[in-house]
């Protein structure tokens, strides 16, 4: 009787272990997929941000406001200078 009870408990533990292992595997796969989705969305976000910046520059440069155009050009030059400084380190 005691042996049967122990056998039943061991079988139950083995079954639960198998279930948890399967669930763990599924969660790992889901995590990988979600990380890929995050990377894709980050790339897409950067691309869209670049497009927004280009459109802003184009809008300023095609507009009649010379002060704003010069300001935008100066900002771009400062950003280029920062990149150049970082490259020369």
Image (tube, grey):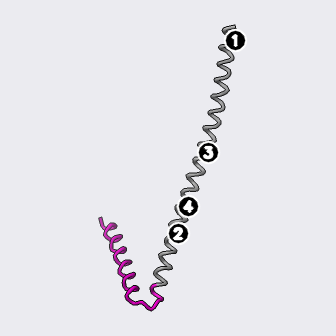
Left or right, 75 with reference to 15: left
User: In the rendered structure, which segment of residues is drawn in magenta?
Assistant: 60-89
Question: Please, what secondary structure does the residue beneath circle 2 have?
Answer: helix
Left or right, 55 with reference to 2: left
Please report contact status of discs 3 and 4: CB closer than 8 Å, yes or no: no
State whether residue 44 is above or below residue 29: below
Residue 6 on the magenta span? no
Q: Which residue is mark 1?
A: 4
The disc, 3 or 1, on the residue closer to the chain's N-terminal end is: 1
Q: Quadrant of the N terminus?
A: top right
The disc, 3 or 2, on the residue closer to the chain's N-terminal end is: 3
Question: How many labels were placed on the picture?
Answer: 4
Left or right, 68 with reference to 4: left
Question: Please, what secondary structure does the residue beneath circle 4 have?
Answer: helix
Q: Which residue is mark 4?
A: 41
Q: CA distance from mark 2 to mark 1?
A: 64 Å
Q: Which residue is mark 3?
A: 29
Q: CA distance from mark 3 to mark 4?
A: 18 Å
Q: Nearer the viewer, mark 2 or mark 1?
A: 1
Question: Please, what secondary structure does the residue beneath circle 1 have?
Answer: helix
Please identify the quarter of the rendering in which residue 18 is found: top right
Name the residue located 45 percent from the left edge and 92 percent from the top edge.
64
Please identify the quarter of the rendering in which residue 25 is found: top right
The disc, 2 or 4, on the residue closer to the chain's N-terminal end is: 4
Name the residue located 61 percent from the left edge and 45 percent from the top edge.
29
């Amino acid at each position: 009787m005691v042996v049967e009870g122990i056998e039943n408990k061991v079988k139950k533990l083995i079954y639960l272990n198998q279930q948890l292992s399967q669930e763990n595997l599924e969660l790992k796969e889901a995590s990988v997929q979600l990380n890929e989705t995050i990377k894709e969305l980050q790339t897409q976000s950067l691309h869209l941000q670049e497009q927004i910046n280009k459109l802003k520059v184009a809008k300023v440069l095609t507009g009649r406001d010379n002060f704003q155009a010069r300001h935008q050009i100066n900002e771009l030059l400062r950003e280029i200078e920062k990149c150049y400084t970082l490259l020369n380190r």
